[in-house]
Image: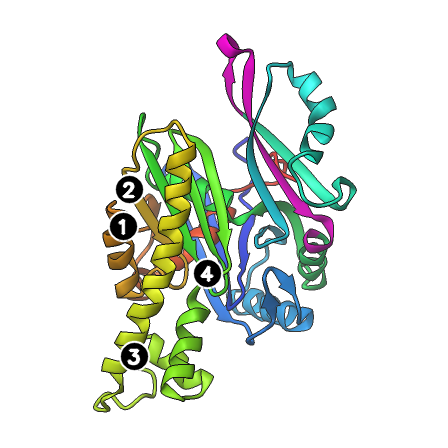
Amino acid sequence: MANRKNALGLDIGSSSIKLVQLRESKKGIELANFSMAPLPSEAIVDGALMNAPAVVSTIQSMMAAQKLRTREVAVSVSGHSVIIKKISLPAMTAEELSESIKWEAEQYIPFDINDVYLDYETLKERPEQGQMDVLLVAAKREIVDEYISVVRDAGLEPVVVDVDCLTIQNAFEISYGYAVGETVVLIDVGASTLNINVLSGKSTTFTRDISMGGNQYTEEIQKQLGVSYDEAEAYKLGGERGVDADSVVPHEVERVMTQVSESIASEIHRSLDFYLATSSEGRLSKIYLSGGSAKVPSLSRTIEQRVGVPVELFDPFRNVQIDPKLFNLEYINEIRPLAAIAVGLGLRRKGDKGR
């Protein structure tokens, strides 16, 4: 299937859009294109498109700037419109499962089953107990259809629709592989949502979305220091963007940032405690942090202290060849943790199993 090209990975996040084009060959995976563009604030709120025209024009200008001819794209959705659950069912054949999954899903999904797109994957057969573990993924049709229409309005063809946390898992598999007997946690800290995916071996065993993220830092700086949203955003990013470096404020900023990191870390801790209390899997071996706020210095430090598990920044380009003649490596190094979803999507192809 060497002629099947990778789709463009288009990560439509709530604060920016990232676009990745990967080429896979016998020599491995290489980066063909990467770009990132900001979105106006409130363009996307909890996964819902509030300002579709802004999203369409941003995608179009990115495509034009990169002179991209490929039209096939992979996109993903997240937020409260997506439900991911591991369920245990009586052992059955693939045919029986496909016939009964809709009925089974109804018991676990808080939406009307006719209003969602449904997908599933068998994780583990447990014949000795007459059981099987199945990963159930449901996404609200209206949200998925909105994303599809925005992509089409931008002149592109959506060939894969995935969900954020499984996309990151896809990137993780390529970058790090799986260690037998290890349980790792992938945490993506977006602007408005934080996503937790616990992997035991190759399988997702627990996921949770928390309505917290990078915006929390900006809002708290704005509130506690009495500055504008743009100033607060600049302070959050390290004060180097148009902010007087000699002012006494950075010390205050650090205090607020640490407070927010504390509250995010305690939410993560609570979720992981719940997982450990309800799961038979062993202890956690490592946490990988991705997303726009992964680079906030106090965040990884605070999570590590609170949860008691080593935290590492997720590098989705770890096994991707990057030509220094084509890309500014300094810039790529800056944005590595931000590119996890886009890279995971860029690994997909038309015809892959998906919704």
Quick one: SS at disc 2? Answer: strand
Asked if disc 3 and disc 1 are in contact, CB closer than 8 Å, the reply is no
Q: Does residue 318 appear in the picture of this structure?
A: no
Pick whichever, 332 or 313, lies toward us.
Answer: 313
Residue at image x 72%, y 31%? 102
Q: Which residues are magenta?
A: 123-144
Marks 2 and 1: in contact by CB < 8 Å? yes
Residue marked by disc 2? 286
Image height check: is 206 above or below 264?
above
Amino acid beneath label 2: Lys
Give the mark nearest the N terminus, 4 or 3.
4
Amino acid marked by disc 4: Gly
Residue denoted by label 4: 190
Residue 12 occupies quadrant: bottom right
Q: Secondary structure at mark 1?
A: strand
Q: Earlier in the sequence, mark 4 or mark 2?
A: 4
Give the distance between the C-alpha atoms of the residues marked 4 and 3, in whole angstroms. 20 Å
Q: At numbered mark 3, what does the secondary structure look like: helix, strand or loop? A: helix
Q: Residues within 10 Å of mark 3 (few under 14, many from 20)?
A: many
Q: CA distance from mark 1 to mark 4?
A: 17 Å
Q: How is the image coloured?
A: rainbow
Q: Quadrant of residue 189?
A: bottom left
The location of residue 338, given as percent across then percent down, is 40, 59
Q: Residue at x 32, y 29 (%)?
A: 282
Q: Nearer the viewer, mark 3 or mark 1?
A: 3
- Residue with the mark numbered 3: 253
Report the quarter where the N terminus lies.
top right
Residue under label 1, please give it: 312
